[in-house]
Each structure stands twice: as C-alpha cells, then as structure tokens.
Image: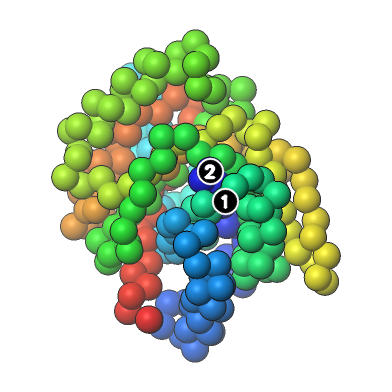
Amino acid sequence: MHYLATLAGREDDSAEPGSPEFDAEVQRYADFEAAAGAAIAGGAALYPAETALIVRHRAGQTLITDGPFTEQAEVVGGFLVLDCADLDEAIQLARTSPAAESGSIELRPTVMYSPHEMPGADWWMALLWERPDAVLAPDSAGWDAAVAEHKLFGDKYAAAIRGGGAVLPPSTATTLRVRGGELLLTDGPFPEYAEVVDGFYLFAAPDRVAAAEIAAEIPCGEHGYVEARQVVDLSAWQ
C-alpha cells in the first residue's frame, strides 16, 4: 500500500538551496532514501511557502493570490510516498526520516496513486486542501462526480501532469514526531491546520504564469483551495 508522508516543519529553520546547510540536509535525505530502498516510491522538496500560488474558487470566480494561505508555525516543505505493507511499517520507516526529528510527518493511505519519475527543474506540486468535513471518501456520495472532474482535468493537461494521487479521509491519518529519540504518535492530521490535504498533483510548467493557469483548472471544493509550489531540482545537488 502507498502512504503519502507530508513533511512539515518551521521554515525559519530551513536552509537555503545552495548553502552548506542545504547540502548537508540533502545528504541526510539521500542516506535515508538509500537505507529505505524500494520502500520510497516517490517524493520531492518544495520551495518556501512564501513562493506559493494559492487558487480558490468562490461564487463562480477563480481567485489567484501569492504567498501562503495562512500563517502556520509549521508549513509543508515536501513529501514522500512510502510503499509499505501496512501503517505500522510506514510509521517505522517514516520515523527514520530527518523530517521526523526537526518537524512532523502526516501519514495517510493513498488512492488512485500515479507514480512519478525524478522531479525536474520545471516541476510544480499542487497540494489540494479541503475542510475535513468536506473530504470525500471512495464510494461516498459525490465521489464519482469528483473523479470525473479530475479525469477531465487530467485529459486536458495530460502532457504536463507528471504524477499525483488522492488520500483517504483525515480519520485515517497518523501524525508522528521524534523527540529525543522517542516516537510521538497522534491520531489524525496535523492538529494546527484548519484544512487537510485531500490530494496532490505533480506537473511541469515553464514559468509561474503557466503554472498558475494549470493550477487554476484543478478541481477544488467551494471551501478548499489549491496551493502550488515549485519543486526543488535536487539533481543539481546529487
């Protein structure tokens, strides 16, 4: 089973790409992924939240703004997709990630996961955020209609889409941290977030304008929003 591991931490503790600290962090993750082997099915690091594009659909209008949607003590800095037999195995793997010691990790089973290759310099990630009570579960009312909307989007932008997937409702989430070597588990999603991740896309776009155009077409609930961030091209540091 595939689990989306959403990595969150304080951005004021993050190293700038190209700095010695960033290089050291990249090496820590490289060591983690080498040890995990095939259990790492995907993943990417994201540029800071202040560089985000936020897309909302309200009263028939599409609103696009710059910067993070809300101020959070911790923001999403990247993600991993873990291929594990069950949640216990995913937890034991995630706890060894550098993100578990410096921030927190939310684990949730994926559905309709589409694998991706090594992210490139022109890749973007679109995180789909939704109110917890508005998240649709497979086979629930509205699920098939939502899937049909996403299929239309996928068909339209097939040449740009590089991967993605949906996740099960927030009741299936487990949030973990490691502090002083001790594993701390919490049932449910990140407790400080008003919205939860409902799915994600990876897509290629030549510039910010093109990325905004694609992100604006992603189906999103009336009370949710899409957060698009450029993916860090880690191949330049490997």
Q: Residue furthest front?
A: 85
User: Would residue 79 be visible to someone looking at this image?
Assistant: no
Q: Are marks 2 and 1 in contact (CB under 8 Å)?
A: yes
How packed mark 1 is, by other alpha carbons closer than 10 Å (few <14, some 14-19, many 20 or more), is: some
How packed mark 2 is, by other alpha carbons closer than 10 Å (few <14, some 14-19, many 20 or more), is: some
**Coloration of the structure image:** rainbow
Residue assigned mark 1: 84
Q: Position of residue 79 (x, y in %)?
A: 50, 56
Q: Position of residue 129 (x, y in %)?
A: 50, 37
Q: Position of residue 118 (x, y in %)?
A: 32, 63
Residue type highlighted by circle 1: Cys
Residue type highlighted by circle 2: Met
Residue 143 shows which numbered tag?
none
Name which quarter of the figure residue 148 lies in. Answer: top left
Q: Residue furthest bottom?
A: 20
* On screen, residue 157 above or below 18: above
* On screen, residue 128 above or below 27: above
User: Would residue 16 be visible to someone looking at this image?
Assistant: yes
User: How many numbered discs, if any?
Assistant: 2
Residues under labels 2 and 1: Cα distance? 6 Å
Residue assigned mark 2: 1
Name which quarter of the figure residue 122 lies in. Answer: bottom left
Please state which of residues 15 and 147 is positioned toward the viewer in this rendering. 147
Q: Is residue 72 left or right of residue 138?
A: right
Name which quarter of the figure residue 98 lies in. Answer: bottom right
Q: Secondary structure at mark 2?
A: loop
Residue at horizontal 36 percent and vertical 23 percent from the top = 147
